[in-house]
Amino acid sequence: MEKAKFKFMEFFEKNIEENKISFLARVFGIFSEEIPKIWFELKGFQVLGRPTISIENENKTEKATLDFCQEKGGKYYIVEQKCFLAYDDCKLLNTESDEFKNAFEKWHNNKKEQTKAWKFFVNFNTNTGNYSITYKKNKNDKSKPLKNNEIKKKLIWGSISDNGKEIIKKHLGEDLEIYSIEEMIKEIINKEEYLNLIKSYQDSLIAFFNFLNTGKI
């Protein structure tokens, strides 16, 4: 695959039966969070772990855990990844389409009502509210505090366009940094760390389907 043509939508439209896209999206979702971590680490960021935001609200504490946090040069970031491939017939993936605005606003409004993590991420602002952030590298690790100064937000989407950025920022703020996992893959597609990640899952899938075909272990 040529680096300049890495586009999920083009691949799906040319190669995949429509009813198989959801299957591929679920497989991709299993390991897709590892891809940005590789990209950011190659850019000099330190991935610290999964952050938990605690907010004091009317004498009670509400908590929500986000995807990961990172640090570089004394600056800290909280990151959410929403790399939808098949959701709503790919309407959230194809940010260049006329349907993206309505699809995103519908998803965003429902998500804020149903998911505390997304609501916390959307509303997070270091200048307002009584909050604290801790993080863990691994599940059984002891929580560590994340320094509260200069924390910014990053969102990782599946594919992004200028149109998509404009629509998302209207709801999440102009200071939000938005990244595309497509663009990340383009940059690291020949890097050893990325190739090893893909090969590990590819080998497992091939072995499993060979087992389904032959029954041989």
Image (tube, rainbow, N blue to C red):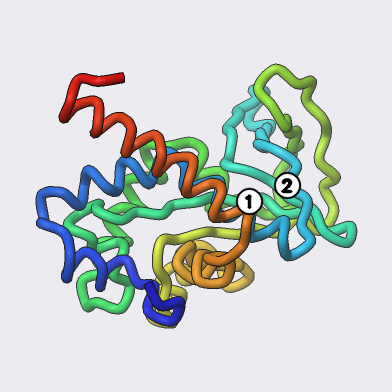
Looking at the rendered structure, the kind of residue marked 1 is: Lys
Front-most of residues 207 and 96 = 207
Front-most of residues 141 and 183 = 183
Residue at horizontal 61%, vertical 62%? Answer: 191
The answer to whether 175 appears left or right of 215 in the picture is right
| Callout 1 secondary element | helix
Dot 2, crowdedness within 10 Å: few (<14), some or many (≥20)? Answer: some
Residue at horizontal 22%, vertical 78%? Answer: 98
Q: Pointer 2: what residue?
A: 47
Front-most of residues 8 and 162 = 8
Residue 60, by quadrant, is top right
Relative image position of residue 78 (x, y in whole percent): 66, 50
Q: Pointer 1: what residue?
A: 37
Residue at horizontal 56%, vertical 48%? Answer: 196
Q: CB of mark 1 within 8 Å of CB of mark 2?
A: yes
Relative image position of residue 137 (x, y in whole percent): 72, 32
